[in-house]
Each structure stands twice: as C-alpha cells, then as structure tokens.
Image (spheres, rainbow, N blue to C red):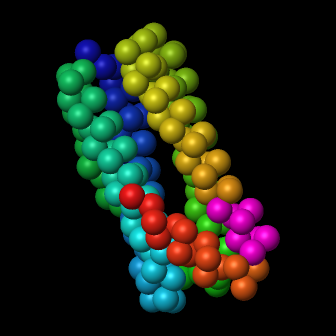
Amino acid sequence: MISKKLQDAINEQINAEMWSSNLYLSMSVFFAKEGFNGFASWMKHQSHEEMGHAYSMMDYMIKRGGTPVVGMINVVPTGWGSPLEVFESAYKHEVHISELIDKLVDVAAAERDKASQDFLWGFVREQVEEEATIKDIVDKLRIAGTTGIFYIDAQLGQRK
C-alpha cells in the first residue's frame, strides 16, 4: 500500500508530466506553423513520451492501492522567438522536471517505500537522458546558426 504522502506527491508529478506533454504539443504547433516540420514532429513525439510518463505513474499507483487524480492542467506558452529559444525553454523545463523527480524520490525514501524508490529511479535515469538530448540539440542549434538549422530540422524529423 502506498502512503497518502507519497500518493499526493506522485499525483503532483502526474500533473507536471501532463503539463509537460501540453508544453511540447504547443511547441510542436509553433514549429509546424513556422514551417519546421522536423522540429514539430520531434516535439510531438516528446509530448507523447511525457503523457506516457503520466500514464505509467497512474498505473503504478493503482497497482500499489493508491488513487491517481487527474488534476487541472494550467495553460502553457504558445509562442517563442526562434527554434533555439524553443529548445532552450525545453531544456530549462527538463531541468525543472528533474528537480521535481529528485524530490519525489526523496519522499519515497522518507516513507521507506523501496518499491516506489525503485520505480522512480527509472524516471531519474530517463531524465538524465532527456536533459542530455535536449542540451545536445541546443548546442547544435547554437553552432549551426541560421544556415544549418534546416539540416538539424530534417535530422530531428527522423525521430521514431
């Protein structure tokens, strides 16, 4: 059985993951409207991935006897100045999500819930990868400038 304190903390993270999904979907729309179809596709994949995190947390909580709560999702930004600014925003957001997940692991540890700690460590490892991937895109966009941006757009459009 999952504790009330941990259940509440996971529910907050579920909401954060759903907000993240909406953020990346908004970024996808922005890119599509700007003609960057590769970036739009990449962000749409990222949106699906974030929603998958929320689903996974919900499923886990049910298995542990908890009650997932789908809360209200706040409005996300809808516009940015450049592709670099979008990916810089995405990187900053992933760093924030990493901090939230680290705190969630701390709650599981304080509750002495080893199964939840183990489950959540999977998200910690995934966050390291997500941060690194987006940081790499930011770095490439900075180096590429305006002439190389279309190559990066095409490369990111190949994400499966």
Give the position of the N terminus as an image quadrant. top left
- Apparent side of residue 29 relative to residue 72 in the rendered image (left or right): right
Give the position of the C terminus as an image quadrant. bottom left
User: Where are the magenta residues, as a range?
Assistant: 137-144
Residue 117 visible to an observer of this rendering: yes
> Looking at the image, how many numbered discs can be counted on the residues?
0
Q: Kindly identify the residue that appears in the image at 72 percent across and 85 percent down.
A: 147
Residue 140 counted in the magenta span: yes
Q: Kindly identify the residue that appears in the image at 61 percent across and 77 percent down.
A: 151
Please name the predominant secondary structure of the magenta segment in the image.
helix
Q: Kindly identify the residue that appears in the image at 34 percent across and 29 percent down.
A: 7
Residue 101 image point, x, y percent: 52, 36
In-front residue for pair 117/65? 117
In-front residue for pair 138/92? 138
Q: Is residue 37 above or below residue 158?
A: below
Residue 3 image point, x, y percent: 33, 19
Q: Kindly identify the residue that appears in the image at 48 percent across and 75 percent down.
A: 38
| Quarter where residue 139 is shown | bottom right
Residue 70 image point, x, y percent: 26, 49
Q: Residue furthest bottom?
A: 34
Residue 51 counted in the magenta span: no
Q: Residue furthest right?
A: 143
Q: Is residue 33 above or below residue 73?
A: below
Residue 35 image point, x, y percent: 49, 89
- Apparent side of residue 53 relative to residue 143 in the rendered image (left or right): left
Residue 86 visible to an observer of this rendering: no
Q: Is residue 21 above or below residue 60?
A: below
Q: Is residue 88 above or below residue 38?
A: above
